[in-house]
Amino acid sequence: MLNIVIFGPPGAGKGTQAKLLIDKYQLIHISTGDLLRSQVDAGTELGLQAKKFMDKGDLVPDDVVIGMINSQIDKNKNANGFIFDGFPRTTIQAEALDNLLNQKNIPVKIVIALEIEQNELISRLTKRADIEGRSDDQDISTILERIKNYHEKTAQLLTYYKNQNKLVSINGIGNIEEIHERICKIIDIR
Ligand code: AMP
């Protein structure tokens, strides 16, 4: 089973690249951001609670997102593999994912980290605000808070996965197709 984590700061292009990979490798896309936004749109209790964190650029509590991942994996028992996008974002989430997948004997195979400098992230997210209308892209203070949270809580996972020999860093600058090719080359030699 081909389980991939696509990793990087907000605006790195994780969602865009994940969508190309699911087509090519027939994977199930699990994006915690998308799952949370659909709960917000549906006005569920979980969505209402999550929105408070998302609007400030903060992370939603670990137990909420871990619960969502659990149920998505269980729903797709016959999958060729999963691509985790925007998850894990904390060490607790990464350990929970390892426990969950190891129990099922389907560990994470590779972690693809998209590398991009901060100015480029800010410019992409500000542009995305107009195109996609996401509420957490609308103001610069929320964007900066999300990037700060990435550095404080998420970036440490680079070491976590490096220690497991699963981390591959990819230059995330370039056109979408070029970056996709870079990622596929890595996946195909693993
Ligand atoms: P994303 O679409 O991945 O940029 O996520 C949008 C927002 O959803 C984030 O800023 C967080 O508030 C929340 N979120 C998404 N994934 C997670 C996660 N794995 N852990 C905690 N919060 C998350």
Image: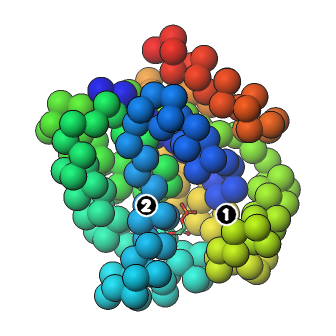
Circle nearer the viewer, 2 or 1 = 2
Distance from mark 2 CB to nearest ligand 1 atom below 8 Å: yes
Please give left or right for residue 146 compared with residue 164 in the image: right
Quarter of the image for residue 182 reads top right
- On screen, residue 65 above or below 168: below
Check residue 32 in the rendering and tell me which mark sits there, or answer none: 2
Q: Position of residue 22 (x, y in %)?
A: 48, 37
Mark 2 → mark 1, Cα distance in angstroms: 17 Å
Distance from mark 1 CB to nearest ligand 1 atom below 8 Å: no
- Residue for badge 1: 147
Q: Position of residue 162 (x, y in %)?
A: 48, 30
Quarter of the image for residue 46 reads bottom left
Residue plotted at (36% across, 28% down): 2
Residue plotted at (30% across, 63% down): 68
Quadrant (top left, top right, bottom left, bottom right) of the N terminus: top left
Quarter of the image for residue 58 reads bottom right
Residue plotted at (50% across, 35% down): 23
Where disc 2 sits, the SS reads: helix
> Callout 2: few (<14), some (14-19), or many (20+) C-alpha neighbours within 10 Å?
many
